[in-house]
Amino acid sequence: MSVKAIGAYNFPAKDVRENFPAPLLFIGWEDHLMFAAPIALPLPPDTPFGAVGPGVLPGTYGSHPDFAKIDWTQVEWTKSGQPWQPDPAKSLAENGLQHKDVIRFRTPGLTGLNGSCN
């Protein structure tokens, strides 16, 4: 939908990196509709990517019955809608993640509550 402003539409952005305690990373879990959209997490850029799944995500996605069944070695990742293979030993920054990037993960064999996304 287009917007027609009645005046100048110039103002400083409020969602710049400097306004957050750490860069925001949006993480979505595919095929799990209990979570309608990616979750924004402020994560330090030096966080090892391998710590995100088992160390960070239980606090956000752990309430889902499928979460405990995730085999993190089999997770399929996308970044900006494209297949992506992060290096778990490298930091978020070393994996090329920046403020407000969106990544998603798919968990083969786990397709929502009682397979609801089959």
Image (tube, rainbow, N blue to C red):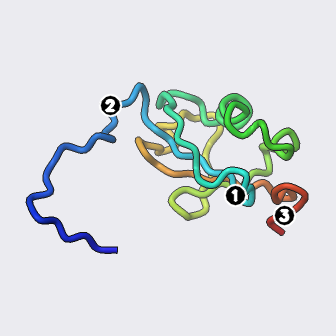
Q: Mark 1: which secondary structure?
A: loop
Q: Distance between the residues labelled 3 and 1?
A: 12 Å
Q: Position of residue 47 (x, y in %)?
A: 55, 28
Residue at the farthest bottom position: 1
Which residue appears at 81% of the width and 57% of the height?
112
Of the residues shown, which amino acid type is indicated by label 2?
Asn
Which mark is nearer the camera, 3 or 2?
3
Q: Residues within 10 Å of mark 2 (few under 14, many from 20)?
A: few
Which residue is under mark 3? 116
Q: Residues within 10 Å of mark 1 (few under 14, many from 20)?
A: many
Which residue appears at 56% of the width and 64% of the height?
82
Q: Where is residue 93 in the image (x, y as percent from the top left)?
A: 47, 37
Residue 91, relative to residue 27: is it above or below?
Answer: above
Which residue appears at 72% of the width and 57% of the height?
33
- Residue 53 lies left or right of residue 67; in this view the side is left
Location of residue 19 (image quadrant): top left
Q: Earlier in the sequence, mark 1 or mark 2?
A: 2
Residue 5, relative to residue 62: is it above or below?
Answer: below
Q: Where is residue 29 in the image (x, y as percent from the top left)?
A: 68, 52
Q: Residue 19 carries which label?
A: 2
Of the residues shown, which amino acid type is indicated by label 1?
Glu
Which residue appears at 57% of the width and 44% of the height?
39
| Between 67 and 83, the one nearer to me in the picture | 67
Which mark is nearer the camera, 3 or 1?
3
Q: Distance between the residues labelled 3 and 2?
A: 38 Å
Q: Earlier in the sequence, mark 3 or mark 1?
A: 1
Residue at the farthest front position: 6
Q: Position of residue 56 (x, y in %)?
A: 66, 31
Of the residues shown, which amino acid type is indicated by label 3?
Ser
Q: Which mark is residue 30?
A: 1
Q: Mark 2: which secondary structure?
A: helix
